Image (cartoon, grey):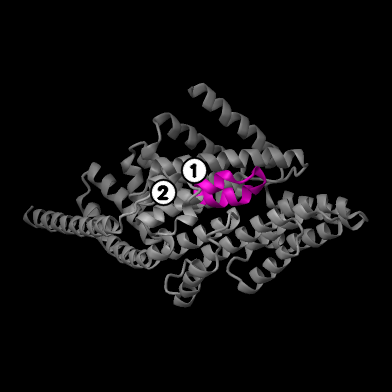
């Protein structure tokens, strides 16, 4: 088995080396200039799309935005709907925080004649916008708008799978991706079941869901086994897309960065990995570091991948300074800080570093209090939705999870109350341990 896994890593390393020659900025820029000159001599819209895709795949994010619009309009002249929809989705990813551009993209999507393809792309664009807006939990106007859409803007009697997906994603974002109540978990699972019913051509929606699910299950007290499973799905989908694009002659399409993110997140869920899997993933990350300048730049700047590997291999002496470096990042969420401080507590305890252990524990308590307040907000939102959504069997009647749903609302309230009590007791216990350790240090 180990030899097979090593062989697989080598195969994808060789595939990646095909793109490595064009990875450096000077090399990429020279190719972009070459294809730009070639583009000016073409008269066929179909031929122009092929060259524009070369330029798109070679460009940085800013260059891709400009080229995306060129591909969209050129694809319109060539009557290539798939290319148009592809660029509308890319532009949504680039501009998820710009409402005016999102509205324009939705208008352009509505002009597409293929109804199913149009519906899938519309949901993808809206999901990108929702995900970005939901990052600000204090945007009460957005939350009110979202609640109104959830309760009034969907046909619960209908069979439209895209409308159901839209509703479920709105519920996930309304409750907040930091939520962990019964409704949130059930909604996420039901969304996943519907995603698997989609045709292969809806890979952008599958990719979007797998990423969201992997992030959610990677949280502190999450489900590392599920997180790893979703990242494996992402990697499988990425390999399929890479092969598809090779057949379409998109020879510069590169998924190294996407693969790196999945591998790094998998390493962060090392408790669900075997020692063999840990080493295979580590080798894969090392191969990406060696061949891709973007991955190298990220790893040189951010040390999460190293932290996870040190913890996974019980190299606590190296893990402690690496974790302290990661925790200096001001952009970390409370959930991320909680997880890293938990790792730091473990590492410090293993090497008898009491000072670091106490500091990490104090920070862990601070983040736990913030998370508890977020959970209370999420629970209040869940109660607001429960009567109007959860008790409507029309939404979930086609779902395999329908028979497993909890129907006793009092049972859910008790479950949520117990969760809050357990969190409070855990915090009190940690405070007691800190006071005890401080007292020991003073006496010594």
The relative height of residue 83 versus residue 139 in the rendered view (above or below) is above
Disc 2/disc 1 C-alpha distance (Å): 9 Å
Magenta residues (range): 192-211
Q: Which residue is mark 1?
A: 230
The image quarter containing residue 14 is: top right
| In-front residue for pair 273/343 | 273
| Image marks 2 and 1: residues in contact by CB distance under 8 Å | yes
- Residue at image coords 47%, 66%: 135
Q: Is residue 390 magenta?
A: no
Question: Which type of secondary structure does the marked residue at label 2 adopt?
Answer: helix
* Image location of residue 101, percent across then percent down: 66, 71
Judging depth in this view, the residue of 75 and 63 nearest the camera is 75
Label 2 sits on residue? 217
Q: Residue at x 66, y 35 (%)?
A: 15
Q: Is residue 309 visible?
A: no
Residue 263 in picture, x, y percent from top left: 50, 42
* Residue drawn at (86%, 51%) of the image: 46
């Amino acid at each position: 088995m180990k030899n097979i896994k090593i062989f697989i890593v080598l195969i994808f390393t060789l595939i990646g080396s095909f793109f490595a020659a064009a990875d450096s900025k000077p090399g990429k820029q020279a190719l972009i200039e070459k294809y730009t000159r070639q583009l000016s001599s073409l008269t066929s819209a179909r031929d122009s799309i092929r060259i524009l895709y070369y330029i798109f795949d070679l460009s940085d994010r800013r260059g891709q935005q400009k080229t995306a619009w060129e591909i969209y309009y050129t694809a319109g002249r060539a009557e290539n709907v798939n290319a148009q929809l592809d660029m509308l989705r890319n532009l949504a990813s680039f501009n998820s925080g710009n409402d005016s551009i999102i509205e324009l993209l939705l208008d352009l999507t509505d002009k597409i004649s293929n109804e199913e393809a149009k519906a899938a792309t519309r949901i993808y664009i809206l999901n990108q916008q929702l995900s970005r807006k939901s990052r600000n939990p204090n945007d009460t106007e957005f939350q009110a708008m979202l609640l109104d859409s959830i309760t009034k803007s969907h046909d619960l009697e209908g069979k439209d799978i895209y409308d159901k997906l839209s509703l479920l994603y709105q519920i996930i974002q309304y409750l907040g991706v930091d939520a962990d109540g019964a409704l949130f978990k059930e909604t996420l699972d039901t969304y996943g079941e519907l995603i698997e019913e989609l045709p292969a051509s809806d890979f952008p929606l599958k990719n979007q869901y797998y990423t969201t699910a992997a992030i959610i299950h990677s949280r502190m007290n999450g489900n590392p086994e599920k997180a790893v499973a979703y990242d494996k799905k992402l990697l499988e989908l990425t390999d399929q897309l890479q092969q598809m694009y090779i057949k379409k002659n998109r020879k510069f399409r590169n998924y190294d960065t996407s693969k790196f993110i999945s591998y790094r997140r998998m390493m962060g869920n090392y408790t669900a990995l075997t020692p063999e899997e840990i080493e295979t993933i580590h080798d894969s990350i090392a191969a990406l570091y060696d061949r891709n300048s973007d991955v190298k730049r990220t790893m040189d700047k951010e040390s999460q991948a190293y932290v996870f590997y040190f913890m996974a291999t019980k190299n606590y002496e190296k893990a402690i300074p690496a974790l302290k470096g990661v925790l200096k990042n001001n952009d970390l969420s409370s959930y991320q800080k909680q997880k890293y401080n938990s790792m730091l507590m473990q590492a410090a305890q293993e090497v008898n570093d009491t000072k670091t252990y106490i500091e990490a524990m104090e920070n862990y308590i601070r983040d736990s209090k913030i998370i508890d307040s977020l959970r209370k907000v999420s629970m209040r939102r869940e109660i607001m939705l429960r009567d109007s959504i959860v008790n409507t069997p029309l939404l979930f009647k086609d779902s395999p999870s329908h028979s497993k749903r909890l129907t006793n609302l009092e049972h859910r309230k008790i479950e949520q109350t117990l969760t809050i009590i357990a969190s409070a007791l855990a915090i009190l216990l940690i405070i007691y341990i800190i006071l005890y350790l401080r007292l020991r240090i003073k006496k010594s």
